[in-house]
Amino acid sequence: MTLASIMKLALRQLDEAAEDITEYDELFKSYANMGYMIALRLFLKPRETFELTTDEEGCADIAALPIMRVVEVLDAQGRPVRFSLSADGTALKTGEKEARIRALCEVEWAALEEDTDEPRLPSYAHPALADYICYRHLSSGSLAKQSRAEFFRQSFYQQMRTLTPQGAGSVTRLRNLYAVTDARYRR
């Protein structure tokens, strides 16, 4: 669904006329993006791999990248590399000096701006953004509207819980692996 069709669905769910979309356009876009960011940051957690080059101190500049969290860093041979972030979060510090590294990161995708933009969520989750718009729109109203808003909020989060984060189910750390997978009977 496009952003425009998500907003039209929200209008229908609110029992408003479709011609009134211009009246709600900016507000609904704002609400849709709030719901979209919740979906991305808390539920989908999209990941991308970035090829970086470190300097003579082992630092790689990441200021211009849409990184939310660095998950893993590998050297040119695919071996794990210890890393940390600078205090301001603009550089990735490693022990690899003047080398090529690959950083697997959770990223933030761009907000929905144009009516033709489509959320980068599975298509079955697109209507949940209309639910979020309805929730936010009704939540500041009377007690009856707030009751309806609660239904839309629950519907949104129920749908979001069906999203599987990218990389879910993979082992990313080997520390205490044997303690976790020990199948012996314990009392």
Image: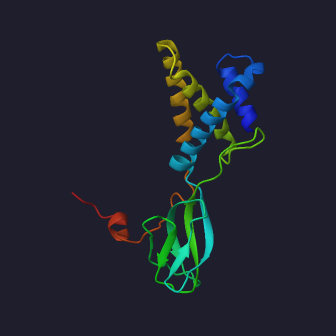
Count of marks placed on residues: 0
Indicate whether 116 appears above or below 151. below
Q: Residue at x 69, y 23 (%)?
A: 11
The image quadrant of residue 1 is top right
In the rendering, at what x and y percent does residue 155 appear? 55, 30
Residue 23 in view here: yes
| Residue 180 placement, left or right of 31 | left
User: What colour scheme does the image use?
Assistant: rainbow
| Residue 69 placement, left or right of 123 | left
**Which residue of the protein is positioned furthest toward the front in this rendering?**
88
| Residue 75 placement, left or right of 179 | right
The image quadrant of residue 77 is bottom right
Q: Residue at x 50, y 47 (%)?
A: 42
The image quadrant of residue 61 is bottom right
In the rendering, at what x and y percent does residue 107 appear? 58, 58
Nearest the eye: 98 or 182: 98
In the rendering, at what x and y percent does residue 172 appear? 47, 67
Residue 1 in view here: no
Indicate whether 137 appears above or below 4. above
In the rendering, at what x and y percent does residue 135 appear? 55, 27
Q: Residue at x 75, y 34 (%)?
A: 4
Q: Residue at x 52, y 86 (%)?
A: 56
Quarter of the rendering occupied by the C terminus: bottom left
Indicate whether 38 appears above or below 76. above
**Which residue of the protein is positioned furthest toward the left in this rendering?**
187
